[in-house]
Amino acid sequence: MPVIRVTLIEGYDEAVRDRLLEGYSAVTRTVLGAVPDGITAVIDEVKAANYRRGNQRKSPKAPPPAPEQIVRDFLAAMERRDLAAANAFLAADFAMVFPGGARFTTLDELIAWAKPRYQRVGKVYERFDTVPGMDHAVVYCYGTLEGIWPDGSAFAGIRFIDRFTVRSGHLLDQAVWNDLAERMSDGG
Amino acid sequence: MPVIRVTLIEGYDEAVRDRLLEGYSAVTRTVLGAVPDGITAVIDEVKAANYRRGNQRKSPKAPPPAPEQIVRDFLAAMERRDLAAANAFLAADFAMVFPGGARFTTLDELIAWAKPRYQRVGKVYERFDTVPGMDHAVVYCYGTLEGIWPDGSAFAGIRFIDRFTVRSGHLLDQAVWNDLAERMSDGG
Amino acid sequence: MPVIRVTLIEGYDEAVRDRLLEGYSAVTRTVLGAVPDGITAVIDEVKAANYRRGNQRKSPKAPPPAPEQIVRDFLAAMERRDLAAANAFLAADFAMVFPGGARFTTLDELIAWAKPRYQRVGKVYERFDTVPGMDHAVVYCYGTLEGIWPDGSAFAGIRFIDRFTVRSGHLLDQAVWNDLAERMSDGG
Amino acid sequence: MPVIRVTLIEGYDEAVRDRLLEGYSAVTRTVLGAVPDGITAVIDEVKAANYRRGNQRKSPKAPPPAPEQIVRDFLAAMERRDLAAANAFLAADFAMVFPGGARFTTLDELIAWAKPRYQRVGKVYERFDTVPGMDHAVVYCYGTLEGIWPDGSAFAGIRFIDRFTVRSGHLLDQAVWNDLAERMSDGG
Amino acid sequence: MPVIRVTLIEGYDEAVRDRLLEGYSAVTRTVLGAVPDGITAVIDEVKAANYRRGNQRKSPKAPPPAPEQIVRDFLAAMERRDLAAANAFLAADFAMVFPGGARFTTLDELIAWAKPRYQRVGKVYERFDTVPGMDHAVVYCYGTLEGIWPDGSAFAGIRFIDRFTVRSGHLLDQAVWNDLAERMSDGG
Amino acid sequence: MPVIRVTLIEGYDEAVRDRLLEGYSAVTRTVLGAVPDGITAVIDEVKAANYRRGNQRKSPKAPPPAPEQIVRDFLAAMERRDLAAANAFLAADFAMVFPGGARFTTLDELIAWAKPRYQRVGKVYERFDTVPGMDHAVVYCYGTLEGIWPDGSAFAGIRFIDRFTVRSGHLLDQAVWNDLAERMSDGG
């Protein structure tokens, strides 16, 4: 039943407005359980000259990339071992936790830790989920790992899930769970 | 900068309205990167008699419980092995995936599978995250497992994460990742 | 698709608000051909103290009765020959046109004209239609006449239609068409 | 006193928007009896990309012609005996009722019935009235008939009224009342 | 033509809401030159629980007294020589300018300066004007002075004007112009 | 906390819209004492075709010049003794009051009165203040006079204040206070 109406200074591109409308619709659907056809969401765009806060015009800064996109780009850089590109996504106090509770603050530490575990690893994604938030967004992605064991044999279909905290276009942390040990303990 | 205004038929309780305003604020902050103080969200409540869709009055049905609450209640029922209560949360075609890719469609199957793995397990939650959606919501929770191994020794601090799909107050599926195998392969 | 939102000073009773919402919904459906479920109509009620036009508070006068009700009440008064009540509905310059183009400005003239035509006549209504307007509303009603011919025999099922112009709770004019002559020329 | 505000996806042409604003103004005036200068009606047009219902964009279909226009076009086709054009306006289950209760479902039946009644008939319109509705609109038109009697003599000034039910650009039914019999019984 | 609509958290008392509506109406009239009857101003009150900025509820603080009231109260305190009450209206860095450019920062300085000029002075007000502002408001008042000259003779009808800067309920400064010297140079 | 939203027919130029937004912001700040960042003001512009009052389109007339501008232009014309230009700003029943209560209704009277007082006078403005109003606006300006005494000596820094009532682009009256007599009585 609800009608959601948001007033924006004009100039946001369509993909950004799409994400807003999707987000408001999803929140409404989830919180109220309203029938989808009863959820109307509308954006009113007004000229920058027609908007003031505190009697001052505002020039909205460009919105950050979608958190999912940041995570995808970071993971792609890691997969092709482009550490310079991957590092550019990390916040100053970035931290990682890997299976078994291994903690790192640099990508080099991670790579050193992974070296005896596999020669190469890649991710096949099943889904990304984004949790919007005031302070930061959270992005989850999960699917399966495929790659090469240290002994040169191949593996695939090993379940994984990653969780990223994203703020202002940078990653604050990454947490990883997967079934690698499960597979290895199966005699993998 | 944006102003979000939602028109609701009056009668939703305050906790529901809170979740709406939080949700809209979070979506706006995440998508636009707007400064928090520039994000205004307002609910207009109108009498049921003052609202029509298709020239018909609407009586909004009671909103479902928050997806996080459903998951918390299900997990609590499981932990105290109250299977009747736990089953009441499951959709007809519920399915589970556990580490190593073990798949079950009933709680009994899960319990049989878990029996040789531990005598008892409990979850210490670090955080719940909810992803709103049109078709369903997704709830993630993660933290650590503590319990008793089959040999009677205790364990604790083993990382886990669960992912639930929630629709209309029921769970469609659960996926679990954890470091149990990692710990066991460490000689746990 | 449209959302219609009307702001009213509070105090109009529910039947009046119902007619407003019905009217806006019907106009929207008729003009746009929009699917009914896509037409949302909402009334916002504000306190009289929260409304000004020309920097002056307004006290909305009581709305007039629905035009259909005025016509129904007038016709009922005529049918029971309560001329005092019927006259109370007529505007100062009221005029009537009856089949054959007979024109009257008073109910007495009408009654004199009708005397040789039937001993008694009553109306069985099939439907009332109201045409809203800025200057006046128009009410149509149609159905069948039943009554007693001058010779004492009964008639029924004779088609009629009336058209009334209504302004500020009074009738400006009435135009009548019916099949009485058709029936009489059939040897009625 | 009221302010009516309708939000539309942009793209409706000005004549359609005019009819909406006229319709809302007329409903408001008729129901509330508000002074005309106190009735403000405004259309907000938003880009299609800025509107979602059920999280889906909507492409409003072209609105149907005004019901009055459909009736005018149908009557003009009938008057020039362009039956192909006239038939194109009729719904599948169209039905007509003429004075004396004559009922037809095809134009051919009507023409056969009319043949002994007049050689030719035309309508001089005094006014059209449209009644908006959710399910269908109703159009009334009235005025006078002029034409040629079977004996070749001319007639004019004979009162008539037609009532049409219009849905989705087609006529569901037509009901006709007129004074032809009245005139004939006068020795016409 | 304009419609001004302001959304407020409910709880402001009616006098405050009146001043808002008057202020918006006056600004609109002055800037646009619109006909008064075309200026509609409306307040929407929403529950505090239905409003968030930056995802936080807001509790509006009590509005300050009207600037005109502060000035009236200060001037009344001065006239009855209640210096304690008068001082309570002054901001920490209050400053005054009197005819001839005499500058003071305390009421005591003013009183010392005035002593040889008149035994007593009172103000008859013709009008107060308030200039709203973001940083501070300005209040003007003017009229005539009446009182007693040092020699015991009375005076009256001497034109004066005062200008006050008001912020957060306190006076930042006062500037005074009057015709006392004019009258005295006339041999007053 | 408030959100002010004004709906205008499009076509007002940006300086006019700026003055509206400034005015609404200042009124809100002054009346409510709200923090500036909590005051949002937005203009919605709608096409003339999308606006009706009393079911009629409105063509807003060009807004009058800002009252301050009218006063500035009048004072500049007076200073350069362009009486034709200055007279064009005066309403038919214009009236002036000068120090000592001197009253004039024409500029010629003023000039005759001033002749023995100074050879030339100019104004150095410190500030203009505008008081918006429904019936008229009031403009205050103050600062210092500089010029030439009748004896040919120069003066400067003499405090003055003017008050003008402005309606529909014309001056209804002017009231003047200054320290000229104060200075003269000092032996100026």
Image: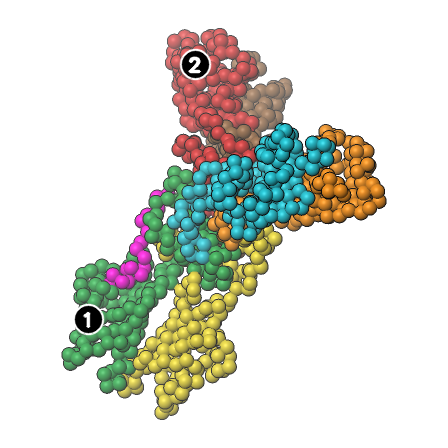
Chain colours: A orange, B cyan, C green, D yellow, E red, F brown
Q: Mark 2 = which residue?
A: E85
Range of residues picked out in magenta: C57-74
Residue B52: horizontal and vertical position, in percent?
43, 53
Residue F165: horizontal and vertical position, in percent?
48, 34
| Left or right: C76 as drawn, with respect to E9 | left
Identity of the residue furthest to the left in this view:
C152
Q: Chain of mark 2?
A: E
Whether residue C60 appears in magenta in the rendering, the answer is: yes
Q: Give the residue drawn at x 37%, y 44%.
A: C10
- Residue at mark 2 shares a chain with residue at mark 1: no
Q: Of the residues shown, which amino acid type is indicated by label 2?
A: Ala
User: Which one is nearer the viewer's eye here, E38 or D47?
Assistant: D47
Q: Mark 1 = which residue?
A: C111
Q: Residues within 10 Å of mark 1 (few under 14, many from 20)?
A: some
Q: Chain of mark 1?
A: C
Residue A70 is marked as none
Q: Give the residue drawn at x 48%, y 29%.
A: E60
Identity of the residue furthest to the bottom in this view:
D151
Q: Of the residues shown, which amino acid type is indicated by label 1?
A: Ile
